Amino acid sequence: MSTLTDVQIITKDGKPEYAVLPYKDYLRLIGQKEVTVPHEVVEYVLKNDCNLVKAWRLHFKLTQKEVAEKAGITQSALSQIEKSENVRSATVEKIAAAMGILPEQLLD
């Protein structure tokens, strides 16, 4: 693990009380990745009134068939998911893995 260099120590009665560190360092320490969505994906969602599953798929220039096969679901199931607002968490995980992204990146 790399050394933290941008940490602020706050003391109380001369003793360290709190350590303030950049958010990215905090996420790294707790083992989480920061969840981001590219501008192009967000723009596609807004301009085409679709959900994140479809926007990510199109961003990666993948067909429904390609994503469905990698996710272990049918193409027709993926088509329904792309039209739905509610997707089961297990299915979200499969689709995210198929596209190489975090499940959180598929959630509004």
Image (cartoon, helix red, strand yellow):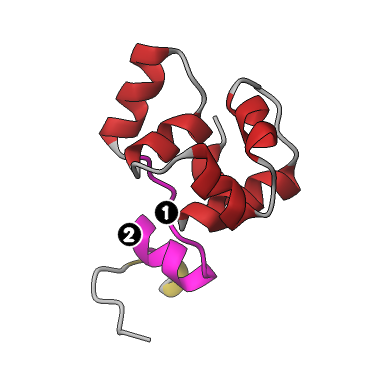
84 and 68: which one is in front? 68
Eye-nearest disc, 2 or 1: 1
Residue 67 visible here: yes
Residue at far left of view: 5
Q: Residue at x 38, y 86 (%)?
A: 1
Q: Is residue 21 located in the magenta-colored stretch of the structure?
A: yes
Q: Residue at x 65, y 30 (%)?
A: 81
Q: Earlier in the sequence, mark 2 or mark 1?
A: 2
The location of residue 74, given as percent across then percent down, is: 69, 42
* Amino acid at dot 2: Pro
Numbered range of the magenta stretch: 19-37
Q: Residue at x 55, y 51 (%)?
A: 96
87 and 70: which one is in front? 70
Quadrant hosting residue 108: top right
Q: Residue at x 57, y 36 (%)?
A: 107
The location of residue 83, given as percent across then percent down, is: 61, 20
Q: Is residue 79 left or right of residue 21?
A: right
In terms of secondary structure, where does tag 2 sit? loop
- Tag 2 residue: 22
* Amino acid at dot 1: Glu
Q: Is residue 20 located in the magenta-colored stretch of the structure?
A: yes
Residue 19 visible here: no
Quadrant hosting residue 61: top left
The location of residue 71, given as percent across then percent down, is: 62, 53
For the residues labelled 2 and 1, the Cα–Cα distance comes to 12 Å
- Tag 1 residue: 34
Q: Is residue 94 left or right of residue 30?
A: right
Q: Is residue 49 left or right of residue 38?
A: right
101 and 1: which one is in front? 101
Q: Residues within 10 Å of mark 2 (few under 14, many from 20)?
A: few
The location of residue 27, given as percent across then percent down, is: 45, 62
Give the vertical position of 71 relative to 3 (above or below).
Answer: above
